[in-house]
Amino acid sequence: MSLDKTIIMLIKIRTFDTNIYEVKVVAAYIVYKISRLLFAMKRARDALTQFNSHVNVFKSMIGPPELMFEHYSWLSKQFSMFASLFDETTSESSTATQALNPGFFFKEAADYAKKRKTSAYDICQDANVYPSSDPLNEWNNIEFYGQRPWRLIKTLNNLDFNTIEADGVQALKFYENTKVDHSKAIISFLGNAMKQFKHYKCPRMRNLLAVQMADEYYNAKDYSKALTLWSHMLWDYRDEGWEAIAHELVNKCLKCAYLTASVQNYVELNLEALKYYKNIDLQKALNNIGSIIQRQIPEPEKTLNEYEKNVSMEEWKKCDSLRSRSVLEIDMSVTNSTIDTKVILKDVSCDGIEIDIFIKAKFPILVQFSKLIACVTCIDNTYDVEVCTDSNKLIYGESKTHTYSCKFVPSPNDVGKEITVNSIKLQLGNEPDFPIVLKFYSSIKKTKSFEREINNFSLSKTYDDEFERIKQITSTTLKPRSSRLGMEIKHKNPALLLEWYKVSVCLTNLEDRPVSDVCLNLSINRNNNEKVEHSIEVCEDPDKNVLSLPVDFKLDSMLVGDQKTQSFYIRFSSLDTRTFQLMISYSIEDNNRTKIACVKDVEIVIDVSIVFDISVSYMSSRFEPVSKVYVGEPLIVVPNIKCLSPWPILIESTSFQLAKHVTISAGGYQSVLNGVTLESDECASEVICVTPSELSENILGCFTINWKRTDVESECKNGYSSLELPKIIVEKSTFLVDMKLPAHGWLHTPMSVVYFLHNNSESLLTLDVSMEANEAFMMAGHKDLNVTVLPESTYKLHYNLYPLVVGVSTLPKMHIGCTSEPNDFKHILNDILVRSLQTQIYIMPKHLPIHHTN
């Protein structure tokens, strides 16, 4: 038989007071099965329909009136069961919505649990004795669901039906009255419902249930939890502008605060109650606040019963806050205050800070305070400034704006830092009593959400509210006293790349009294690129340690009219324009011998120019450009220098830092530019002959020029320019040739020429050497020669040449052939001969002696 037919047949059963509970229990079990299957089949709507039908059928089947609480318990269980099933299903799918979710069913379960509690109180309050026949003894041994355990006893013992039935009902009433924690069940259902409404973003339903949960905590005499929940809901309803609800919650919170002897909460709530109370209640709230100030127990709330009054009196007698604490501070940002404050900072300087404070109170009667304090904070310091201590000037009543002013001198260390009026304090009462300090945070402006929405539709105000038109200024930067030191900055812009650039700062004391703690602070302006700071070096003397930015230069004290000069050097390793911030700070005493800090800021803009444009070319021994070089072959390095400086530059020295695989050729190196001065756009060249000793892909080395300005007045120290030599291909050759001959020859004068044949291989090298004569020279030596050069050795060929013509003459040409090596070697030989051997020489005319005649 299907479950649908089963439930239909069950409904058709004729019910009596004796079997109604059993029918409802079986029906609940069947509907649970049906609902679970429908939810599993994704038929949530059918499950909801089935459950509603089930509740509607059995809702009116109450049973015996004396067991009314049992019927409400059954209904509560039905809604709780269905809510759990619904929640289990919605966690796997999205069938629930804001308008229909498990929270509504948990709420219904809580509502029926409340009805159960009420009916149990009405019916069972006199059931304090358990029947001697123990009718619930077989409760855990019944044969069928919903069966009454005492019916088994009656069947077995053949007792009187009416007697045993009466004992059974009495036993259930006793159990309900003494064993069941109704509040716990209600709170559990409400908690589950709140969780669902929070999940489905129903904040107002959640707030409503939170208030009901707090009510139940109160009924359960758990006053602390009730106070916590009501307080949170008070904030929400107050912010949304529900004044009637907020008023009611204030009353409830006051009762809990009094019952728990929570001094802090009790005073906060009484202060908020001043906005809602009138006449007697208002005066009572003020009197209770006065009692707290006098360290006395306040008057009980009028809605408390005798039991609650006795409990609360015991709590207040044990309260340590009234005896041990010296001051009670109340944060007015968490209450609906009847006082509004605004602050304006004026004339914020090292000479003094002026503060205007505006207070608007809305008390129905006059209330007198004892002290007004402004709390001013800085990064390192806190100031409690007493604005007014005359209580006669601190009497507030109906809406009226009161204005107060004060001035105080801040610490010199706070110059340049942000000063903030953090809060305003109003004090009720004085020590040795228990004064209450109301703390108003100036940065918090509470605006109700409904006010924000309705402002777009509000009519123009019929009155001019002065307080509303005041614009707060709660924070600003503390300005230093204006400096009267004369300052002159000397430097010759632009600076040159990698020179020690001198900057001089000349200070003159134009104050009417001596100054002390004079300090110059040099820092890079924030507008510069972040990478720029890493390309700057600063020092007082280039021969001493480099300082890191920002840097301070101490000048100590200066008398009236004194002059002091502070010089420093800056070196730049990139061409960016720099902006520096130079801050001069010092202290001066006023007439009260109070030290006042003075600061003056100036900007220094320095451009950077490049000194030289350096390019490097490589040449062979014939001064012809080459793109590669052989190991052991001489290579001429020619740096070409062009001066780009706007100032004349004196080259002090040049140097080459060669790599390990490069050596200077025979003859050494001597700079030809030492002591040379270059004007702007003038050019110069340096030369050196080097020899690579091994294969390498690294650079040959680095070329450095040490230089300085010729302008003595600039006083800038020397600088340097450096360039890495460009890479060149270095190859290894098995054969090299070079020659030694004089720089020039003389006509008809013999000269010696030596050829060096280098075998760099590990085998014998057989060469055919021939010399091609010409008309410019007569030659003495082998014209054709077969030469064998040993491995890793050099063979020398000597020739004597006799010049026959004057001027540039072509030397006899050498030809070298090799039959023992492959054809590729012949091409290498020709290339080496072309690039290595000099082809011309200059012949000077012969010097003729001068004959003197007498």
Image: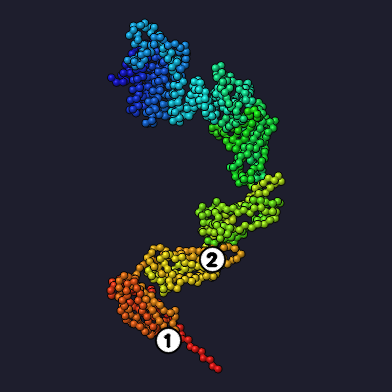
Query: Considering depth in this image, is 671 or 530 the residue closer to the camera?
Result: 671
Tell me the residue at 38%/11% (across/down). Answer: 135
**Does any portion of residue 618 appear in the rendered image?**
no
Tell me the residue at 33%/28% (across/down). Answer: 41
**Residue farthest toward the bottom in the current orientation of the protein:** 854
Q: Position of residue 586 (x, y in %)?
A: 64, 50
Q: Which quadrant would residue 181 be assigned to in this image?
A: top left
Tell me the residue at 40%/25% (across/down). Answer: 83
In this figure, which residue is indicated by the disc labeled 1?
748
Tell me the residue at 39%/19% (across/down). Answer: 55
The amino acid type found where label 2 is placed reads Trp
At mark 1, the secondary structure is loop
Q: Position of residue 501 (x, y in %)?
A: 57, 60
Q: Quadrant of the N terminus?
A: top left
**Does any portion of residue 503 appear in the rendered image?**
yes
How packed mark 1 is, by other alpha carbons closer than 10 Å (few <14, some 14-19, many 20 or more), is some
In this figure, which residue is indicated by the disc labeled 2?
707
The amino acid type found where label 1 is placed reads His
